[in-house]
């Protein structure tokens, strides 16, 4: 990432179609591409760049399945079943965190380290 300030505020306009333009300085600093994630946190809108990562745990799932002896079509079916169960599990975890902790407002809060 390019060097830039850790926190910097800037006033932007909102079009009649509710569109905003990310200032070039911010866009470049965050190395944004054609998509962004947007979250509502309290009374703030947080926009973050989409990062292509292996957060879906595919490699871990495949390794476990191979270690368990799956192969061929059975491997594919079990891989899809397990991969599709990740999101509901994380959503349940997040719901539980919301009910039991006041300072957790997003999935990011569950994984971010304290600064």
Image: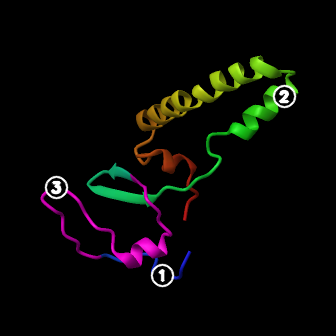
Name the dominant secondary structure of the magenta segment. Answer: loop
Query: Helix or strand or loop: what does disc 1 sit on?
Result: loop
- Which residue does the numbered mark 1 point to in the structure image? 4
Which quadrant is the N terminus positioned in? Answer: bottom right
Residue 14 is covered by the magenta coloring: yes
- Which residue does the numbered mark 3 point to in the structure image? 17
Q: Which residues are magenta?
A: 10-37
Query: Helix or strand or loop: what does disc 2 sit on?
Result: helix
Residue 48 lies, in percent from the top left, at 43, 59
Residue 99 lies, in percent from the top left, at 41, 33
Q: Residue at x 75, y 18 (%)?
A: 73
Residue 89 is covered by the magenta coloring: no
Q: Residue at x 74, y 40 (%)?
A: 59
In the image, taking residue 113 as reference, residue 67 lies left or right, namely: right
Could you tell me how far apart the alpha carbons at marks 2 and 1 are, in whole angstroms? 45 Å
Q: Answer yes or no: do the residues labelled 1 and 3 have beta carbons within 8 Å? A: no
């Amino acid at each position: 990432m390019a060097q830039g300030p850790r926190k910097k505020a800037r006033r932007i306009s909102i079009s009649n179609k509710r569109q905003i333009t990310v200032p070039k300085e911010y866009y470049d600093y965050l190395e944004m591409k054609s998509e962004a994630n947007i979250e509502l946190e309290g009374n703030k809108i947080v926009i973050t760049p989409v990062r292509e990562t292996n957060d879906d745990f595919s490699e871990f799932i495949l390794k476990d399945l191979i270690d368990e002896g799956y192969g061929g079509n059975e491997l594919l079916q079990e891989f899809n079943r397990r991969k599709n169960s990740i999101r509901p599990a994380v959503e349940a975890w997040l719901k539980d965190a919301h009910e039991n902790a006041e300072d957790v407002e997003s999935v990011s809060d569950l994984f971010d380290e304290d600064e």
